[in-house]
Image: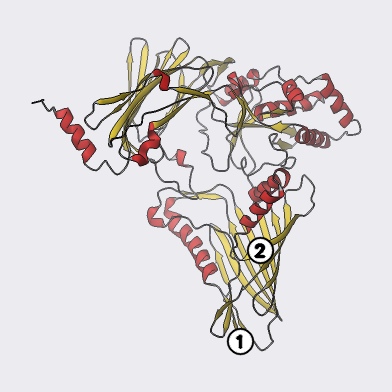
Amino acid sequence: MPRISFFHIFLFLFFSIGFFARAQVVRYDTKVKIIKGRKIIEKSFLININSRDDLHLADIEIEVQNSQEFKLLEASALDSHGEQVRKLKKRDIKTRSNLSYESFFNDDVVKEFELFWNDFPYQIKYAYRIVEYKFVSVANWYPLVDKDVSVQRASLQVVVPSDYPLSMDFSDLLQYKVTENEDVKTMVWEIRDYRKPEKEMFAPHVLETIPHVSVFPQYFKYGVEGRADSWASFGAWFDSLNEGSLMLTVREKMIVDKLLEDIHDKKEIVKTLYHYLQDNVRYVNVRLDIGGLKSFPAQYVCQKKYGDCKALTTYMKALLNYVGIASNYVLVRGGFDVPRINKKLPAQQFNHVFLAVPTGNDTLWLENTSGTVPFNYVGSSLQNRKALFVDEDCSKLVDLPAMTLDDVYEERVFEFRLDEGGNGAITIDQEFRGSTFEMYRYLQKSLNLQEQERKIKNGLNTTYLELKSFSFLSSDRDDHQLNILVEASGKNLYRQVANMKIIHPPVLQISTPEKPDKRRNPIRVHIPVHKSDSIIYNLAIPDHWEVQLPPDTSLDTPFGKYETRYLKENKKLVVVNKFQLFQGEYPVKDYEAFYSFFSEIDKTGHQAGIIISIQ
């Protein structure tokens, strides 16, 4: 009879008691070692696959940069007794280019393989090594493998020479231990039984709430030697990395001379060159060799007429430099909802670059990757955050301008011309600013008519109308607003109840956040909201019919304001809805009041109905 060990009993219990419901990462270990200027990363995984719903975890993709060396150390499938039932063969590993819809040229690759097995439950076990010779980060680690899968144990080990200067920051939720042995320093972080929290509305970015470790070298060589012991030194390194990239072709200089021959005002010169960039080059994501950080030279864009954010920003900087106007790179973490950078940790924490042009007491901001945004416009994906203003040894963190309530104002005017049956024409005059303006400006310039119509109809968020036509009302390319006029029709817009006709006016599109009993994080409104709807009903009803209007509503809170007003003028009914949400941060103890504000708005909008009594 075979001997049954304690290990086999443990495995049987582990797989059979409560683990069939969902996958689990049993172990996730990362080891980083700095040896003679190389960074060696080893990652190993042991994951429970309990059903077919978990098989996506056995379909494995590993991104590898062209400058890195990759080696798969092991890959196998284990049955419920811990016995190996499948071992990956070398020919089972596929390599493909890491191109995506965001990337035009890219010499990075993806190593992919699968560890499928037919009998559930089973485990997958794999490990790999990556060697880097150029790096600006030692480790940027989170204890997660998949967003929906809990981790039983995760660890990070970093081994560096004792005299290797580091900057680092890590979460208090992690167990931390450091040891020194001869000339080597070893740091270990560990966490057990962890699951990623659910994303919450109006909250810090989820990555700010996850335990993490960030470790950066204070001295490094990436393209050129650099330091990151301060933001000034890191900015100086970025400047030196891109030194010598501002040369234009002879043809480009001749074009600039012709463009500017009658323009002498500095701001007008900058605007003219910015419009020239927008009209003549396009954005593509190009990542070749150290192209992840180093810009292609301006001559590259002159010849190719395209580039990524670094190349286009360098090209714009070169245009300005040619006419004697100084400008500065600005490094930022771009996006509509992104984690904040760690101000205490000078390092590469950015994913985007644009340009600042100081003009006396003011600064012009140039977003060079878009052919549709206005001149000197800090949009919703850049506003209200820290950025690195690159100025050699004087580089520093700055606050980018925050959008105000006026900057994000959206107004819609609905005019209904209805007969006694509730049928008729509808005109909707819309004026947009902020992120909605940016979206519609893009689709106006970039999408075909069918796609434009679909987007505009979806934006109205109504099911009762049939869109007949739409038009973008003419505006200057540098306006910060866009008007769209929609002509539509509707049928049976009255709801008949006994001898009454009931009208439910369109409600403002406002999402209600999670209930207070589920809230964990403080409140963060990173961009304000300001909306107004005016709904006008021209009604073909007899004078003796009685109209009952709901009561007006007014809410005024520390978080924002809301009001609804109802007016009757002869055969015209007017409903006005206004909503403001202030930019700001509030402690979690205020969340119940914050939620109550939204809840009252929702209740008001869905209970309100105009009643027309037929006499």
Displayed quadrant of residue 31: top left
Please state the horizontal and vertical placement of residue 399, each as a whole percent of the image: 61, 38
In the rendered image, the vertical position of residue 413 relative to residue 50, given as above or below: below
Amino acid found under the numbered disc labelled 1: Ile
Tag in front: 2 or 1: 2
Instruction: Identify the residue at the far right of this view.
Output: 262
Displayed quadrant of residue 314: top right
Instruction: Tell me if 362 is positioned left or right of 346 in this view.
Output: right
Please state the horizontal and vertical placement of residue 201, each as a whole percent of the image: 48, 50
Q: CA distance from mark 2 to mark 1?
A: 28 Å
Q: How is the image coloured?
A: secondary structure
Instruction: Tell me if 13 is positioned left or right of 542 in this view.
Output: left
In the rendered image, the vertical position of residue 491 relative to residue 301, given as above or below: below
Mark yes or no: residue 293 visible.
no
Answer few, some or many: residues within 10 Å of disc 1's Cα (few below 14, many 20 plus, some between 14 and 19).
some
Which residue is nearer to you in this view: 401 or 471?
A: 471
Q: Earlier in the sequence, mark 2 or mark 1?
A: 2
**At x 53% / y 26%, what residue is drawn?**
346
Mark yes or no: residue 547 visible.
yes
**At x 23% / y 28%, what residue is drawn?**
82
Instruction: Identify the residue at the far left of this view.
Output: 1
Name the residue that disc number 2 marks.
466
Q: Is disc 2 placed on a helix, strand or loop?
A: strand
Q: Is disc 1 placed on a helix, strand or loop?
A: loop
In the rendered image, the vertical position of residue 45 relative to residue 241, given as above or below: below
Name the residue that disc number 1 marks.
614
Which residue is nearer to you in this view: 182 or 41?
A: 41
**At x 68% / y 51%, what residue is drawn?**
450
